[in-house]
Image (cartoon, rainbow, N blue to C red):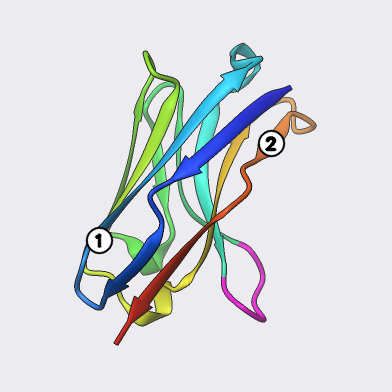
């Protein structure tokens, strides 16, 4: 099992910034990719950004140039720096840890609320 603990959500005005953190523990050797997804009310969960153990990143088009994902391998922690936030970024953000080859290895955090006011 892998446990994921998220932090850093909150309320911010449009144009502001937030940084999300996700610390992983447990059988982390089974994980080779970590990322962030989000789910707004009435919408499906969508990928925001992810990063592999080798450092390759992928971003949703809607956040490119505004959000940056990074990881600290020594701390088993992944970060999402969110700048120039928009009201449409409002959602519950979920940390994800997975194995890109062994698809059954897939873990989720409990979610953290991000609310951007206009």
User: Residue 108 in magenta?
Assistant: no
What residue occupies the far bottom of the structure in this picture?
A: 118
Q: Which of marks 1 and 2 is nearer the N terminus?
A: 1
- The residue that appears at 44% across and 73% down in the rendered structure is 90
- The residue that appears at 64% across and 28% down in the rendered structure is 3
Q: Can residue 99 be seen?
A: no
Q: Is residue 95 above or below residue 56?
A: below
Residue topped by disc 1: 66
User: Residue 42 in magenta?
Assistant: yes
Q: Is the magenta stretch mostly helix, strand or loop?
A: loop
Per the rendered image, the range of residues in magenta is: 40-45
Q: Can residue 21 be seen?
A: yes
Report how far apart the C-alphas of labels 1 and 2 lie in the structure: 26 Å
Q: Is residue 118 above or below residue 41?
A: below
Q: What element carries label 2?
A: strand
- 25 vs 22, left or right, is right
Where the C terminus falls, by quadrant?
Answer: bottom left
Residue 1, position in %: x, y? 74, 22
Task: Tell me the crowding category of disc 1: few under 14, some 14 to 19, or many 20 or more residues within 10 angstroms, Cα based.
Answer: few
- Name the one closer to the observer, 68 or 110: 110
């Amino acid at each position: 099992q892998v446990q994921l603990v998220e932090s850093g959500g909150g309320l911010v005005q449009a144009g502001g910034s937030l940084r999300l953190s996700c610390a992983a523990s447990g059988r982390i050797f089974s994980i080779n990719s970590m990322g962030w997804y989000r789910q707004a009310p009435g919408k499906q969960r969508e990928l925001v950004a992810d990063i592999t153990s080798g450092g390759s990143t992928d971003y949703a088009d809607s956040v490119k140039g505004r959000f940056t994902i990074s990881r600290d391998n020594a701390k088993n922690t992944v970060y999402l720096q969110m700048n120039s936030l928009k009201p449409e970024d409002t959602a519950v953000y979920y940390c994800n840890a997975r194995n890109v080859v062994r698809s059954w290895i897939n873990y989720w955090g409990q979610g953290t609320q991000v609310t951007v006011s206009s």
